[in-house]
Amino acid sequence: MDQNAITSRILSSGVILSLSLIIIGVILVFIRGGGDGVSLSEIANYHNPGDTITSVSLLPGNFIGGLLAGDGLYFISVGLWVLIFTPVTVLIDALVTFGHERNKLYTLLDAIVLFNLLLAIFVIPRFIG
């Protein structure tokens, strides 16, 4: 299969899956009047940021339990993570392809971009606020 077709399939699948999860999550949050023990009014409370729910309270270790419980906030969180990791998946695919083709320059450049992206996702946020 052509590399452009693979990249296109990864991107479109990631966006569709992400959008589906987010829409399901929003519907569940409205049907249940909240999620993760937090009411809808508390989720929408932007006047008092200390009382709102954030990504810090929705830990990835709780994703499976939240999804199995039908908690809309976890569907939204997983959908956002899928959206974030869609381009990471494209970079990993390109890294494997360039490595297989023994294209040293593009393999190196792709590895640097992938490293920078993963650093920005996982390491840098730990040092911010």
Image: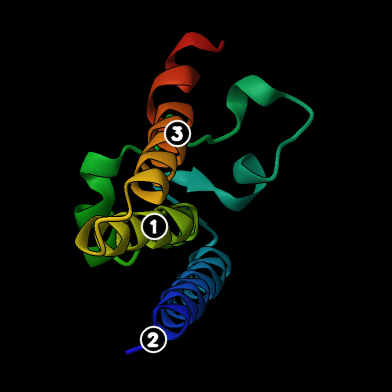
Who comes first in sequence, dot 1 or dot 3?
1
Which residue is pictured at 51% across the width and 80% down the height? 12
Which residue is pictured at 61% across the width and 44% down the height? 43
Mark yes or no: residue 94 visible: yes
Above or below 21: residue 5: below
Of badges 2 and 1, nearer the viewer stands 2
Q: Quadrant of residue 74?
A: bottom left
Q: Is residue 29 left or right of residue 63?
A: right
> Dot 3: what SS?
helix
Q: Amino acid at mark 1?
A: Val
Above or below 26: residue 60: above
Instruction: Find disc 3 in the rendering and name its residue.
Output: 121
Q: Amino acid at mark 3?
A: Ile
Picture coordinates of residue 8, whole percent (x, y): 49, 80
Mark yes or no: residue 77 visible: no
Quadrant of image for the C terminus: top right
Query: Tags 3 and 2 in contact by the CB under 8 Å rule?
Result: no
Hey, which residue is sitting farthest right in the picture?
Answer: 47
Residue 2 is marked as 2
Query: Tags 1 and 3 in contact by the CB under 8 Å rule?
Result: no
> Dot 2: what SS?
loop
* Cα–Cα span, label 2 and label 1: 29 Å
Q: Tag 1: Cα neighbours inside 10 Å, few (<14), some, or many (≥20)?
A: many
Of badges 1 and 3, nearer the viewer stands 3
Instruction: Find disc 1 in the rendering and name its residue.
Output: 78
Q: Of 124 and 92, which appears nearest the observer?
A: 92
Which residue is pictured at 36% across the width and 40% down the height? 108
* Cα–Cα span, label 3 and label 2: 29 Å
